[in-house]
Image: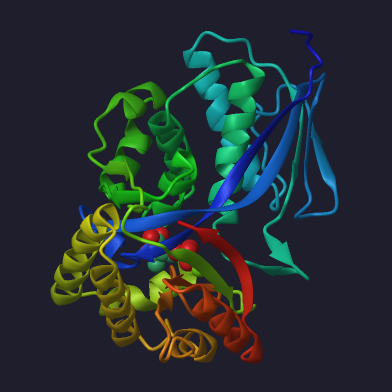
Amino acid sequence: MSKNKIITNETCGKLYIAGEYSILTTGQSAVIKNINIFMNSKISFANKYTIFSDMFDYSITLEKTAFDKKTLQNFDKNYSLICETVSVMNEYLKLNSLEIKPFNLEITGKMEKDGKKFGIGSSGSVVILTIKSILSLYNLKISKDMIFKLSSYVLLKRGDNGSMGDIACISYESLIFYKSFDRKKISELIKKETLDKVLKADWNYEISKLNFNKNNLNCEFLVGWTKKPAISGDLVNIVKSSINENFLKNVENIVKKLREAIKNGDKVTIRKCISENGILLENLNKNIYNKKLKDLVNSTQNLDICAKSSGAGGGDCGIALSFNENDTKTIIDRWEKCGIELLYAEKL
Ligand code: PMV
Ligand code: MG
Protein backbone atom coordinates (compact mmCIF):
# COMPACT_ATOMS: atom_id res chain seq x y z
CA MET A 1 0.00 0.00 0.00
CA SER A 2 1.40 3.40 -0.92
CA LYS A 3 2.06 5.69 2.01
CA ASN A 4 -0.15 8.47 0.80
CA LYS A 5 -3.21 6.45 0.09
CA ILE A 6 -6.37 8.22 1.30
CA ILE A 7 -8.63 5.92 3.28
CA THR A 8 -12.30 6.65 3.92
CA ASN A 9 -14.45 5.59 6.85
CA GLU A 10 -17.93 6.30 8.14
CA THR A 11 -19.86 6.11 11.39
CA CYS A 12 -23.59 6.18 12.03
CA GLY A 13 -25.73 7.96 14.58
CA LYS A 14 -27.90 6.41 17.30
CA LEU A 15 -31.16 6.92 19.17
CA TYR A 16 -32.57 5.31 22.30
CA ILE A 17 -35.65 3.16 21.77
CA ALA A 18 -35.99 2.40 25.50
CA GLY A 19 -34.07 2.55 28.76
CA GLU A 20 -32.66 6.09 28.77
CA TYR A 21 -31.81 7.55 32.21
CA SER A 22 -32.25 4.14 33.78
CA ILE A 23 -29.17 2.96 31.84
CA LEU A 24 -27.09 5.48 33.81
CA THR A 25 -27.29 3.09 36.78
CA THR A 26 -24.77 0.24 36.53
CA GLY A 27 -26.28 -3.05 35.36
CA GLN A 28 -29.46 -1.53 33.95
CA SER A 29 -30.24 -2.06 30.29
CA ALA A 30 -31.46 -0.23 27.20
CA VAL A 31 -32.40 -0.82 23.58
CA ILE A 32 -30.62 1.54 21.21
CA LYS A 33 -31.01 1.88 17.43
CA ASN A 34 -28.38 2.79 14.86
CA ILE A 35 -29.43 5.73 12.70
CA ASN A 36 -27.95 5.49 9.23
CA ILE A 37 -27.11 9.14 8.85
CA PHE A 38 -23.36 9.10 8.49
CA MET A 39 -20.29 11.05 9.40
CA ASN A 40 -17.42 10.50 6.96
CA SER A 41 -13.67 10.72 7.18
CA LYS A 42 -10.62 10.76 4.93
CA ILE A 43 -7.23 9.98 6.36
CA SER A 44 -3.71 9.72 4.94
CA PHE A 45 -0.18 9.84 6.33
CA ALA A 46 1.53 13.26 6.27
CA ASN A 47 4.50 15.14 7.72
CA LYS A 48 2.43 16.98 10.30
CA TYR A 49 -1.02 16.46 11.78
CA THR A 50 -3.71 18.40 9.98
CA ILE A 51 -7.19 17.90 11.34
CA PHE A 52 -10.34 19.36 9.86
CA SER A 53 -13.98 18.93 10.84
CA ASP A 54 -16.83 20.67 9.04
CA MET A 55 -18.31 21.41 12.47
CA PHE A 56 -15.81 24.28 12.51
CA ASP A 57 -14.70 26.23 9.50
CA TYR A 58 -10.98 25.91 10.08
CA SER A 59 -8.39 23.17 10.37
CA ILE A 60 -5.62 22.78 12.93
CA THR A 61 -2.04 21.80 12.24
CA LEU A 62 0.07 20.10 14.89
CA GLU A 63 3.71 19.11 14.98
CA LYS A 64 4.72 15.49 14.77
CA THR A 65 5.52 15.53 18.50
CA ALA A 66 2.28 17.24 19.58
CA PHE A 67 0.96 14.08 21.25
CA ASP A 68 4.18 13.17 23.06
CA LYS A 69 3.76 13.20 26.83
CA LYS A 70 6.63 15.68 27.22
CA THR A 71 5.31 18.21 24.75
CA LEU A 72 1.61 17.65 25.27
CA GLN A 73 -0.08 20.97 24.59
CA ASN A 74 -3.50 22.33 25.32
CA PHE A 75 -5.45 21.36 22.28
CA ASP A 76 -7.69 23.81 20.43
CA LYS A 77 -10.94 23.78 22.41
CA ASN A 78 -13.14 22.81 19.48
CA TYR A 79 -10.77 20.05 18.50
CA SER A 80 -10.04 18.70 21.98
CA LEU A 81 -12.35 15.68 21.63
CA ILE A 82 -10.70 14.58 18.38
CA CYS A 83 -7.20 15.37 19.70
CA GLU A 84 -7.72 13.39 22.88
CA THR A 85 -8.91 10.48 20.77
CA VAL A 86 -5.73 10.73 18.69
CA SER A 87 -3.70 10.85 21.87
CA VAL A 88 -5.29 7.64 23.23
CA MET A 89 -4.91 5.97 19.85
CA ASN A 90 -1.22 6.84 19.75
CA GLU A 91 -0.89 5.06 23.08
CA TYR A 92 -2.74 2.13 21.60
CA LEU A 93 -0.47 2.05 18.54
CA LYS A 94 2.57 2.03 20.81
CA LEU A 95 1.09 -0.93 22.67
CA ASN A 96 0.99 -2.68 19.34
CA SER A 97 4.64 -1.75 18.64
CA LEU A 98 3.66 0.54 15.78
CA GLU A 99 5.50 3.69 14.82
CA ILE A 100 3.54 6.89 15.47
CA LYS A 101 3.23 8.88 12.27
CA PRO A 102 1.26 12.08 11.66
CA PHE A 103 -1.68 12.27 9.28
CA ASN A 104 -4.27 14.41 7.58
CA LEU A 105 -7.72 13.74 8.94
CA GLU A 106 -10.81 15.31 7.43
CA ILE A 107 -14.24 14.78 8.96
CA THR A 108 -17.49 15.74 7.27
CA GLY A 109 -21.20 15.11 7.82
CA LYS A 110 -21.93 17.10 10.92
CA MET A 111 -25.33 15.60 11.77
CA GLU A 112 -27.06 18.97 11.86
CA LYS A 113 -29.12 21.29 9.69
CA ASP A 114 -29.16 25.10 9.66
CA GLY A 115 -26.76 25.10 12.60
CA LYS A 116 -29.08 22.94 14.73
CA LYS A 117 -27.85 19.50 15.74
CA PHE A 118 -30.09 16.48 15.23
CA GLY A 119 -29.10 14.98 18.57
CA ILE A 120 -28.26 11.56 17.18
CA GLY A 121 -24.90 11.12 18.88
CA SER A 122 -22.43 13.22 16.92
CA SER A 123 -19.86 13.45 19.71
CA GLY A 124 -19.75 9.68 20.21
CA SER A 125 -19.73 9.23 16.47
CA VAL A 126 -16.75 11.55 15.96
CA VAL A 127 -14.71 9.66 18.57
CA ILE A 128 -15.42 6.32 16.91
CA LEU A 129 -14.78 7.77 13.47
CA THR A 130 -11.37 9.04 14.58
CA ILE A 131 -10.57 5.64 16.08
CA LYS A 132 -11.69 3.76 12.97
CA SER A 133 -9.75 6.17 10.73
CA ILE A 134 -6.49 5.62 12.59
CA LEU A 135 -7.00 1.84 12.74
CA SER A 136 -7.57 1.73 8.98
CA LEU A 137 -4.48 3.82 8.35
CA TYR A 138 -2.43 1.14 10.08
CA ASN A 139 -4.49 -1.66 8.62
CA LEU A 140 -5.38 -2.82 12.12
CA LYS A 141 -8.52 -4.90 12.44
CA ILE A 142 -9.97 -4.99 15.94
CA SER A 143 -13.24 -6.17 17.42
CA LYS A 144 -16.29 -3.98 17.88
CA ASP A 145 -15.84 -4.51 21.62
CA MET A 146 -12.34 -3.10 21.49
CA ILE A 147 -13.61 -0.08 19.55
CA PHE A 148 -16.26 0.32 22.26
CA LYS A 149 -13.67 0.11 25.03
CA LEU A 150 -11.28 2.54 23.34
CA SER A 151 -13.99 5.12 22.73
CA SER A 152 -15.36 4.71 26.27
CA TYR A 153 -11.81 5.19 27.51
CA VAL A 154 -11.57 8.55 25.70
CA LEU A 155 -14.92 9.77 27.00
CA LEU A 156 -14.39 8.60 30.59
CA LYS A 157 -10.95 10.17 30.63
CA ARG A 158 -12.66 13.45 29.74
CA GLY A 159 -15.11 13.06 32.60
CA ASP A 160 -18.15 12.29 30.44
CA ASN A 161 -21.21 11.56 32.62
CA GLY A 162 -22.98 9.34 30.09
CA SER A 163 -23.84 5.64 30.13
CA MET A 164 -21.76 4.92 27.00
CA GLY A 165 -24.92 3.47 25.41
CA ASP A 166 -24.44 5.81 22.45
CA ILE A 167 -21.00 4.47 21.61
CA ALA A 168 -22.07 0.88 22.25
CA CYS A 169 -24.61 1.32 19.47
CA ILE A 170 -22.34 3.28 17.13
CA SER A 171 -19.51 0.75 17.61
CA TYR A 172 -21.84 -2.11 16.71
CA GLU A 173 -23.60 -0.15 13.90
CA SER A 174 -26.74 -2.03 14.76
CA LEU A 175 -29.86 -2.19 16.88
CA ILE A 176 -28.52 -3.37 20.23
CA PHE A 177 -29.43 -4.42 23.73
CA TYR A 178 -26.93 -2.76 26.11
CA LYS A 179 -26.31 -3.48 29.79
CA SER A 180 -24.19 -0.73 31.33
CA PHE A 181 -20.94 -1.15 33.23
CA ASP A 182 -19.68 0.66 36.33
CA ARG A 183 -18.15 3.79 34.77
CA LYS A 184 -16.92 5.08 38.12
CA LYS A 185 -14.89 1.95 38.63
CA ILE A 186 -13.39 2.06 35.13
CA SER A 187 -12.66 5.80 35.50
CA GLU A 188 -10.68 5.01 38.64
CA LEU A 189 -8.85 2.27 36.78
CA ILE A 190 -8.01 4.73 33.99
CA LYS A 191 -6.40 7.06 36.54
CA LYS A 192 -4.31 4.31 38.11
CA GLU A 193 -3.50 1.78 35.41
CA THR A 194 -1.96 1.64 31.94
CA LEU A 195 -4.15 1.65 28.85
CA ASP A 196 -3.19 -1.97 28.27
CA LYS A 197 -4.40 -3.06 31.71
CA VAL A 198 -7.62 -1.09 31.43
CA LEU A 199 -8.42 -2.60 28.04
CA LYS A 200 -7.67 -6.11 29.26
CA ALA A 201 -9.87 -5.74 32.36
CA ASP A 202 -13.38 -7.22 32.37
CA TRP A 203 -15.69 -4.21 32.29
CA ASN A 204 -18.75 -6.34 32.83
CA TYR A 205 -21.12 -4.92 30.25
CA GLU A 206 -23.25 -6.60 27.63
CA ILE A 207 -23.82 -5.53 24.05
CA SER A 208 -25.99 -7.84 21.95
CA LYS A 209 -27.24 -7.27 18.44
CA LEU A 210 -31.01 -7.35 18.12
CA ASN A 211 -33.19 -8.01 15.10
CA PHE A 212 -36.87 -7.29 14.65
CA ASN A 213 -38.63 -10.50 13.72
CA LYS A 214 -39.68 -9.72 10.16
CA ASN A 215 -41.83 -12.83 9.75
CA ASN A 216 -44.43 -11.65 12.20
CA LEU A 217 -44.05 -7.94 11.91
CA ASN A 218 -44.38 -5.23 9.31
CA CYS A 219 -42.95 -2.24 11.04
CA GLU A 220 -41.44 1.11 10.13
CA PHE A 221 -39.14 3.00 12.44
CA LEU A 222 -39.61 6.78 12.29
CA VAL A 223 -37.62 9.63 13.78
CA GLY A 224 -39.23 13.01 14.41
CA TRP A 225 -36.83 15.90 14.85
CA THR A 226 -38.08 18.72 17.09
CA LYS A 227 -35.40 21.17 15.85
CA LYS A 228 -34.83 22.13 19.49
CA PRO A 229 -31.25 21.23 20.40
CA ALA A 230 -30.82 19.78 23.91
CA ILE A 231 -27.64 19.06 25.84
CA SER A 232 -27.74 15.54 27.28
CA GLY A 233 -25.06 16.15 29.93
CA ASP A 234 -26.98 19.12 31.35
CA LEU A 235 -30.29 17.24 31.37
CA VAL A 236 -28.65 14.27 33.08
CA ASN A 237 -27.45 16.61 35.85
CA ILE A 238 -30.96 18.02 36.29
CA VAL A 239 -32.82 14.70 36.11
CA LYS A 240 -30.48 12.33 37.96
CA SER A 241 -31.78 13.14 41.44
CA SER A 242 -35.30 12.09 40.32
CA ILE A 243 -34.16 8.57 39.42
CA ASN A 244 -35.32 6.12 42.10
CA GLU A 245 -35.53 2.34 42.65
CA ASN A 246 -39.08 2.18 41.39
CA PHE A 247 -38.23 3.88 38.12
CA LEU A 248 -35.25 1.56 37.64
CA LYS A 249 -37.27 -1.57 38.33
CA ASN A 250 -40.11 -0.53 36.04
CA VAL A 251 -37.85 0.47 33.15
CA GLU A 252 -35.75 -2.68 33.47
CA ASN A 253 -38.92 -4.77 33.23
CA ILE A 254 -39.98 -2.91 30.12
CA VAL A 255 -36.57 -3.20 28.43
CA LYS A 256 -36.40 -6.96 29.05
CA LYS A 257 -39.93 -7.42 27.73
CA LEU A 258 -39.18 -5.24 24.72
CA ARG A 259 -36.08 -7.27 23.89
CA GLU A 260 -38.17 -10.45 23.72
CA ALA A 261 -41.01 -8.75 21.87
CA ILE A 262 -38.59 -7.49 19.20
CA LYS A 263 -37.20 -11.01 18.75
CA ASN A 264 -40.70 -12.48 18.54
CA GLY A 265 -42.25 -9.71 16.45
CA ASP A 266 -44.90 -9.25 19.13
CA LYS A 267 -46.55 -5.98 18.14
CA VAL A 268 -48.90 -5.68 21.11
CA THR A 269 -46.06 -5.98 23.61
CA ILE A 270 -43.79 -3.64 21.63
CA ARG A 271 -46.53 -0.98 21.64
CA LYS A 272 -47.15 -1.43 25.33
CA CYS A 273 -43.43 -1.20 26.20
CA ILE A 274 -42.82 1.96 24.18
CA SER A 275 -45.87 3.74 25.57
CA GLU A 276 -45.16 2.73 29.17
CA ASN A 277 -41.52 3.74 28.95
CA GLY A 278 -42.63 7.12 27.56
CA ILE A 279 -45.03 7.65 30.47
CA LEU A 280 -42.36 6.72 33.02
CA LEU A 281 -40.03 9.30 31.45
CA GLU A 282 -42.73 11.95 31.39
CA ASN A 283 -43.36 11.35 35.09
CA LEU A 284 -39.66 11.21 35.95
CA ASN A 285 -38.96 14.88 35.34
CA LYS A 286 -40.84 17.71 33.67
CA ASN A 287 -37.79 18.73 31.61
CA ILE A 288 -37.83 15.54 29.53
CA TYR A 289 -41.07 16.11 27.63
CA ASN A 290 -41.08 19.61 26.20
CA LYS A 291 -44.07 20.83 24.18
CA LYS A 292 -42.79 19.44 20.88
CA LEU A 293 -42.10 15.98 22.28
CA LYS A 294 -45.62 15.93 23.74
CA ASP A 295 -46.96 16.90 20.28
CA LEU A 296 -44.84 14.16 18.73
CA VAL A 297 -46.44 11.50 20.94
CA ASN A 298 -49.96 12.96 20.85
CA SER A 299 -49.85 12.77 17.05
CA THR A 300 -50.22 8.97 17.33
CA GLN A 301 -53.89 9.27 18.41
CA ASN A 302 -56.07 6.61 16.72
CA LEU A 303 -53.14 5.36 14.64
CA ASP A 304 -51.43 1.98 14.70
CA ILE A 305 -48.28 3.70 15.91
CA CYS A 306 -46.46 4.02 19.23
CA ALA A 307 -44.06 6.86 20.02
CA LYS A 308 -41.91 8.31 22.78
CA SER A 309 -39.13 10.78 23.43
CA SER A 310 -35.65 9.42 22.81
CA GLY A 311 -32.55 9.90 24.92
CA ALA A 312 -32.27 12.80 27.32
CA GLY A 313 -35.30 14.60 25.85
CA GLY A 314 -35.92 18.33 26.31
CA GLY A 315 -35.74 18.54 22.50
CA ASP A 316 -33.71 16.67 19.87
CA CYS A 317 -35.66 13.68 18.55
CA GLY A 318 -38.52 11.36 19.38
CA ILE A 319 -39.04 7.93 17.89
CA ALA A 320 -42.08 6.10 16.58
CA LEU A 321 -42.83 2.59 15.38
CA SER A 322 -45.58 2.38 12.80
CA PHE A 323 -47.39 -0.82 11.93
CA ASN A 324 -49.53 0.62 9.15
CA GLU A 325 -48.32 2.40 6.01
CA ASN A 326 -51.27 4.80 5.75
CA ASP A 327 -50.85 5.73 9.40
CA THR A 328 -47.20 6.49 8.69
CA LYS A 329 -48.30 9.12 6.15
CA THR A 330 -50.80 10.55 8.62
CA ILE A 331 -48.32 10.95 11.45
CA ILE A 332 -45.75 12.57 9.16
CA ASP A 333 -48.43 15.14 8.18
CA ARG A 334 -49.41 15.71 11.79
CA TRP A 335 -45.79 16.13 12.80
CA GLU A 336 -45.23 18.63 10.03
CA LYS A 337 -48.16 20.71 11.30
CA CYS A 338 -46.46 20.81 14.73
CA GLY A 339 -43.10 21.82 13.25
CA ILE A 340 -41.60 18.35 13.67
CA GLU A 341 -39.55 17.09 10.75
CA LEU A 342 -39.27 13.45 9.69
CA LEU A 343 -35.52 13.02 10.02
CA TYR A 344 -35.23 9.32 9.27
CA ALA A 345 -37.37 6.34 8.34
CA GLU A 346 -36.42 2.70 8.07
CA LYS A 347 -38.42 -0.44 7.39
CA LEU A 348 -37.57 -2.93 10.11
O1 PMV B 1 -30.08 12.40 24.34
P1 PMV B 1 -29.11 11.29 24.08
O2 PMV B 1 -29.43 10.57 22.79
O3 PMV B 1 -27.70 11.76 24.15
O4 PMV B 1 -29.28 10.17 25.18
C1 PMV B 1 -29.02 10.38 26.53
C2 PMV B 1 -29.43 9.15 27.29
C3 PMV B 1 -29.27 9.23 28.81
O5 PMV B 1 -29.61 7.96 29.33
C4 PMV B 1 -30.21 10.27 29.39
C5 PMV B 1 -27.84 9.57 29.18
C6 PMV B 1 -26.85 8.47 28.83
O6 PMV B 1 -25.69 8.80 28.62
O7 PMV B 1 -27.24 7.30 28.81
MG1 MG C 1 -30.49 14.05 23.08
Q: Is residue 305 above or below residue 222?
A: below
| Residue 303 x/y as whole percent | 43, 85
Res. 30 image quadrant: bottom left
Q: Which quadrant of the rendered structure holds the C terminus? A: bottom left
Query: As rendered, which of 78 and 299 lies closer to the eye?
Result: 299
| Residue 200 x/y as whole percent | 31, 24
**Whether residue 231 can be seen here:** no
Q: Is residue 183 above or below residue 278?
A: above
Q: Which quadrant of the rendered structure holds the N terminus? A: top right
Which of the colour schemes (rainbow, by chain, secondary structure, one colour) is used? rainbow
Q: Is residue 260 above or below residue 2?
A: below
| Residue 338 x/y as whole percent | 61, 91
Q: Give the farthest residue toward the right.
A: 58
Query: As rendered, which of 108 and 103 lies closer to the eye?
Result: 108
- The residue under the point 62% across, 85% down is 333
- Quadrant containing ligand 1 reads bottom left
- Could you tell whether 262 is left or right of 325 in the image? left
- Could you tell whether 186 is left or right of 338 in the image? left
**Whether residue 300 can be seen here:** yes
- The residue under the point 81% across, 40% down is 60
| Residue 131 x/y as whole percent | 57, 32
Query: As rendered, which of 144 and 230 lies closer to the eye?
Result: 144
- The residue under the point 14% across, 69% down is 249
